[in-house]
Image (cartoon, rainbow, N blue to C red):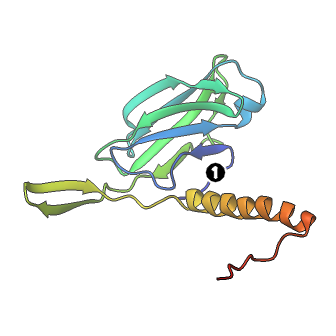
Amino acid sequence: MELVKNIFFNTDKLIQGETVKISYTGNLFQANADKIFIHFGFGQNWNGLSEIEMTKTDLGFQTEITLSDTDETFNFCFRDDYGNWDNNDGVNYIFNIEPANTTTLEEELGLVTVKQRKLRKTYLWSKKVRIALYKIITFIPKIISGNYKRKVKED
């Protein structure tokens, strides 16, 4: 997915029918707007046109939107309560939506549909960083005390 400055999703891929959390820290947020609305639709014709007031947080304005089951693009722009717009210099923000990937598994009781999802790369990196920090934090006191050698059991 193409990255856009000041717009963040809680997922690496936008998938049809899934709910996505959007965070916005663009021009309107930086101008200290009290309220920001996301104006959005799907496909070339902006099907299902809607507008939702976003929730203001310390990290920007946020909201959750359920993506279309059939359309291939997610189109949106932002406006504040004074009528100022952030529409990506007139071309709006447009992201591709990938079709839902379903696989069927045969079990004793019948067929079950399971949605496949890959772990987010950011999640994996955050796990690796946490493990590395844990190892460093537990090793530093041993270095300071001089007790960093592996203890070997003697029978």
Question: Which is more toward the observer, 77 or 69?
Answer: 69
Q: Is residue 83 left or right of residue 71?
A: right
Q: Is residue 22 left or right of residue 57?
A: left
How far from the left and from the top, in percent, is residue 118? 43, 61
The residue located at (75%, 77%) in the rendering is 150
Residue 76 in view, yes or no: yes
Estimate how packed mark 1 is, as few (under 14), some (14 to 19) or many (20 or more) residues with alpha carbons within 10 Å.
few
Say above or below: 155 vs 47: below
The amino acid type of the residue labelled 1 equals Val
33 or 138: which is nearer to us?
138
**Residue 52: percent from the left, percent from the top?**
49, 24
Q: Which secondary structure, mark 1?
A: loop
Residue 78, quarter of picture: top right
As drawn, is 72 to the left or to the right of 32?
left
Residue at the (54%, 30%) spot, across then down: 38
Corner quadrant of residue 19: top left
Residue at screen point 83% across, 72% down:
148
Q: Is residue 2 left or right of residue 25?
A: left
Q: Residue at x 68, y 32 (%)?
A: 60
Coordinates of residue 151 in the picture (x, y in percent): 74, 76
Q: Which residue is mark 1?
A: 4
| In the image, residue 141 above or below residue 52 | below
Residue pushed farthest front? 155
Residue at the limit of the structure toward the left, as seen here: 109
Pick whichever, 49 or 147, lies toward us. Answer: 147
